[in-house]
Amino acid sequence: MNKMTTIALPDFSILFASAFVGFILGSFFFGGLWWTVRKCLNSTSPALWLISSLIVRTSVAVGGFYLVATTSIFHANAANANWQPLVFSLIGFVLARLIITRITTKKESSKKLKKMETQDAS
């Protein structure tokens, strides 16, 4: 008799939810970084802003990844926890980084262009 091994396919709704959680975490992390840097430009104590922002952003991100890795909601079978939800949440995190970088770069470029146009007009 042939003994066949079966590979359990992951539940795609769980993987999508994991990627969405990673995207939210990444948006918070990198959006918060952008906001902090902007705030530091006009602050009298930029080091305090940077350190406190780093602690808050990192704590939220690590805590979120910990929840994805350990919470049974993100695993089809809690006794057989899979690594796929954590990987998909990391993919969502990196995707958020790419999108936030693109959005903030376009905003900064358009501000610089408008500033240059007003200087040329005068």
Image (cartoon, rainbow, N blue to C red):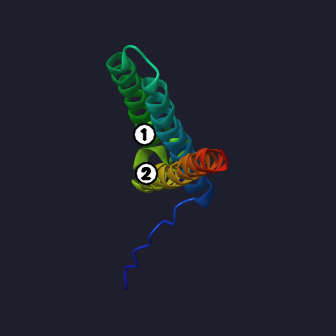
Marks 2 and 1 sit apart, C-alpha to C-alpha, by 8 Å
Seen in the image, is 113 located left or right of residue 49? Answer: right
The percent coordinates of residue 71 (x first, y second) are 48, 37
Q: Earlier in the sequence, mark 2 or mark 1?
A: 1
Seen in the image, is 121 located left or right of residue 22? Answer: right
The residue sitting at 44% across, 18% down in the picture is 43
Quarter of the image for residue 55 reads: top left
Q: Which residue is mark 1?
A: 65
Relative to residue 13, is residue 45 depicted above or below?
above
Say if residue 122 shows up in the picture.
Answer: yes
Seen in the image, is 83 located left or right of residue 71? Answer: left
Quarter of the picture containing the N terminus is: bottom left
Quarter of the image for residue 51 reads: top left
User: Which element carries disc 2, helix, strand or loop?
Assistant: helix
Relative to residue 62, is residue 87 depicted above or below?
below
Quarter of the picture containing the C terminus is: top right
- Label 2 close to label 1 by CB (< 8 Å): yes
- Amino acid carrying label 2: it is Leu
The percent coordinates of residue 47 (x first, y second) are 32, 20
The percent coordinates of residue 2 (x first, y second) are 37, 85
Q: Which residue is mark 2?
A: 90
